[in-house]
Image (cartoon, rainbow, N blue to C red):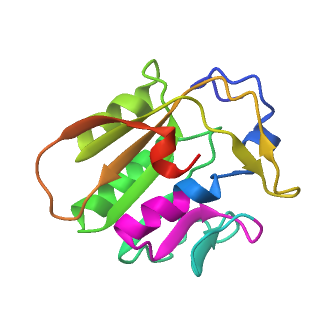
Amino acid sequence: MNTEHKSNTSEVIRDLYQTPKQLFETLDLEFGFNCDIASSDENHFCEDWITQEENALKYGRSWGGVNWCNPPYSNIMPWVEATILKHKQGITTVMLVPADTSVKWFKEAFDSCNEVRFISGRLSFINAETQKPVSGNNKGSVLFIWRAYAKGHCVTLVDRSDFNL
């Protein structure tokens, strides 16, 4: 069992939650996502998506353009590491993860990205099977943004209402 997180939610369920649609749609208007790199046939938002079986981390499936990433929360570090490498190649990625400053992957992401957006309040993720919100999220959320060829570092706090939530 991975000890990098403190969630009491089963890994099987935790890794299947879907991003709230309004949050994704608001960010998509800003970024124009090309690919959902950590999704499934049931929970993807982009026309191009990479499933767990296709594995964006191992099999060389292209991360072109601008990517959306809501990685499996049971093991976030490999996604942060891969995103850092892709950023060095000129790829933009926006990643939604728990705002948990106590874990190593958080510092890696924070130190390497161009922008950090803490989301005030807690998000209700969506059960991909039922399409209903799941309450009880025990952590806040944060967006890490790696912009292609951008320099600098910006940290902001955004309100849930900014995403029509």
In front: 102, or 138? 138
Q: Which residues are magenta?
A: 24-42
Quadrant that contains the N terminus:
top right
Residue placed at 25% from the left, 59% from the top? 147
**Residue 107 point in image, percent of width and height:** 34, 29
- Furthest toward the right, the residue is 130
Q: How far from the left and from the top, in percent, is residue 148?
A: 22, 64
Q: Residue furthest bottom?
A: 47
> Which corner quadrant of the image does residue 106 belong to?
top left
Q: Return the x and y of residue 44 as percentages of the image width and height.
A: 66, 68
- Image height of 47 relative to 13, above or below: below
Residue 107 higher or lower than 47, as above or below: above
Task: Determine the residue positioned at 39% across, 77% down.
Answer: 64
Can the viewer see residue 78?
yes
**What residue appears at the point 44 percent right and 60 percent down from the top-left corner?**
27
Q: Residue at x 55, y 50 (%)?
A: 164
Residue 57 visible: no
How many marks overall? 0
Task: Look at the image and say whether residue 28 sits in the magenta stretch.
Answer: yes
Q: Is residue 136 left or right of residue 163?
A: right
Vertical comparison of 98 with 82: above or below: above
Q: Which picture quadrant has residue 140?
A: top right
Q: Is residue 124 left or right of residue 29?
A: right
- In the image, 17: left or right of 25? right
Picture coordinates of residue 5, whole percent (x, y): 60, 25
Return the residue nearer the eye: 110 or 4: 110
Q: Is residue 37 magenta?
A: yes
